[in-house]
Amino acid sequence: MIIDCDTHLMPREAFDGVEGKFAPRKPILKFNHDGLYVDVDFPGYPPEVPGTSPLLAPGSGAMFKSLWNVPLRMADYDNRLGIEQHVILPQFSGWWSYLIEVELALRMARSHNEVLLRLMQEYPGRILGTALVALQDVAGSIHEMKWARENGFCAVVLDKVFPVKDHPYSEPLGSHRELWPFFKRAEELSMPIYLHNVQHGHRISNLSLFQRDGLYIFAPEEGQMSLVSLITSGLLDEFPGLQFIYTEAGTSFIKPLVLKLDKILEAPPIDYADQEEPLGNRTLTKVGERLRRARALHPAQIFLEKNKKPASHYFKNNFYFTIETEEPELPEAIEFLGAERFLFATDYPHDDPGGRMKFQDVELLRSNPKISEADKELIRWRNADRLFHRARSPGSG
């Protein structure tokens, strides 16, 4: 048994359900004569918003028909991958909608989710769906998440960052306390939350100098900022039952990041209030006042907050990580964190940097001599089955 916990789909009819006065502003997907996705028109996307195209530009998995052709992808899973179940993440994660008109975003999310629901019903037990939400409308997102929960979706999916209107860059999710009611309801519904790491849209920092390669070189670091913000904001102390799935970032960062965070968070907080040492033409007291003002504005800043538990506690209790089977550091990450926090993933149908689709992932995990058979079984399906069963089973919410 294998559950692939990171795959993507771009249904041709994804936004056909956006009708009426909103129809002229919805995305129009474009395909060439060979049936390959090549571009998108999105009249409703704010032209003044900085960043790249709001939807994935041509390239990577966009060049494979299996990005939208479901019978073709099912044939791949049966004949080339040998995988029984796979989780579909939208080709467009949350960032495409966070700054567009609220009503349009809500309709786009529901249209996309209804298309995916039909596929879940057509392939019961094979396709597991994750739901889009328009996070700029917290109440609307809660309503959509509840609908998804009632219809058997296994998770919701968010971008790793939250764009800020009229600001050139985005901020980590933990910086926005107004989103906490959404997270509270996710905990109540036992609904896991995907954080999709690699994105082509809004960013925390300016990667334009690195062009396309910067997306892959630095996206994990941006994702780590958001992950850390969920810890340092106190969110996971307030809602300890939350479960996040962190995708497409590998596992090599986990051990050094956790050790560093534990060291920082265990240190006593610095208090400049009673110090009057000269600092140029100012004093440390004035610096302390500035830091206290910053604390009020940005409660998630790691150097200003002290958590109730070490960072390692949150990594082991609130986060799952999808694996990259070819990553040499994977066995060390499993030994450090425990195999119970890792999920098998292929990122189907996206290709690797070398240009091949990831049909070797099953074999790469099976043949890794540094991972025990018991741990491989957890990663292949048992962890996912346990995690997603919480969301799909009746009785809560």
Image (spheres, rainbow, N blue to C red):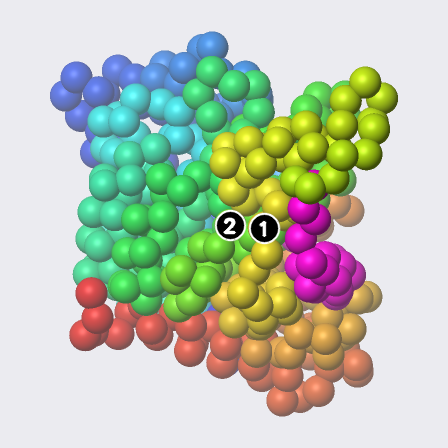
The stretch in magenta equals 249-272
**Going by the image, does 178 lie left or right of 397?**
right
Residue drawn at x 71%, y 87% is 372
Mark number, residue 233: 2
Q: Is residue 296 magenta?
A: no
Instruction: Say which amino acid is labelled 2.
Output: Ser
Instruction: Say which amino acid is labelled 1.
Output: Glu
Residue drawn at x 40%, y 68% is 241
Q: Position of residue 276 (x, y in %)?
A: 76, 34
Q: Position of residue 43 (x, y in %)?
A: 36, 14
Query: Is label 1 in a helix, a strand or a loop?
Result: loop
Residue 220 versus residue 372 in the image, above or below: above
Which residue in the structure is indicated by mark 1?
305
Residue drawn at x 78%, y 73% is 332
- Tell which of 6 and 186 is nearer to you: 186
Q: Position of residue 252 (x, y in %)?
A: 76, 60
